[in-house]
Amino acid sequence: MENTKQLESALDQTVLSAQQLLDHWQGHRRLTRKLIEAYPADQFFSYALGGMRPCSELIAEIMGMSSLGIQGVVSGRWDNFQPLQTSTKEQVLAHWDQVTEQINTLWPQIQPSHFQEVDVAFGQYEGTIYWFILYVIDNEIHHRAQAYVYLRTLGIAPPAFWDRS
């Protein structure tokens, strides 16, 4: 009976492995990168609807949350991010790739038990480390959806939302 309870407890704590969570996040990042590539360069920094920010600002937020977020998860230091200063879509894509590499480099430094620890991200978001990582992914999905609307209003079919290859 005790072994069964221990096994159930272990299974309750392991829905996804750390690698599966990283793969899920990077799948979303690949899809968002495809969206950036599909976005017209002449509209990327200026086109907006209904009081929403231009796509470039949405993407800058995603990059800041991802870059400083992974640093905070690993180090416990949660620096406030400053807006990314870029003037071309190519610069944005280059920075996107740097953040992707940064995530891949820092991720293995997260100890499995650390995902369950509580921290206060950016001095305002209290929760477990796994919760914050999910928040960063959710934030990306939210802003990508806004950019999907932009693309559709510009007459451009966005990348398939399910294709994270």
Image (spheres, rainbow, N blue to C red):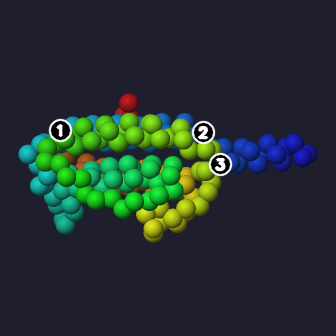
Residue, disc 1: 90
Q: 10 Å neighbourhood of mark 1: few (<14), some, or many (≥20)? A: few
User: Residue 17: which disc?
Assistant: 2
For the residue labelled by badge 2, is the local secondary structure a helix, a strand or a loop? loop
Q: Position of residue 159 (x, y in %)?
A: 27, 37
For the residue labelled by badge 3, is the local secondary structure a helix, a strand or a loop? helix
Q: Is residue 93 above or below residue 82?
A: above
Q: Position of residue 137 (x, y in %)?
A: 43, 50
Residue, disc 3: 113
Amino acid type, residue under disc 3 in the picture: Ser
Kindly identify the residue that appears in the image at 65 percent across and 48 percent down.
113
Decide which of tag 2 and tag 3 comes sooner along the chain. 2
Residue 73 appears left or right of 5: left
Rendered-image quadrant of the N terminus: top right
Foreground residue, 108 or 145? 108
Amino acid type, residue under disc 1 in the picture: Glu
Residue 48 appears left or right of 103: left
Foreground residue, 122 or 30? 122
Kindly identify the residue that appears in the image at 43 percent across and 41 percent down.
103
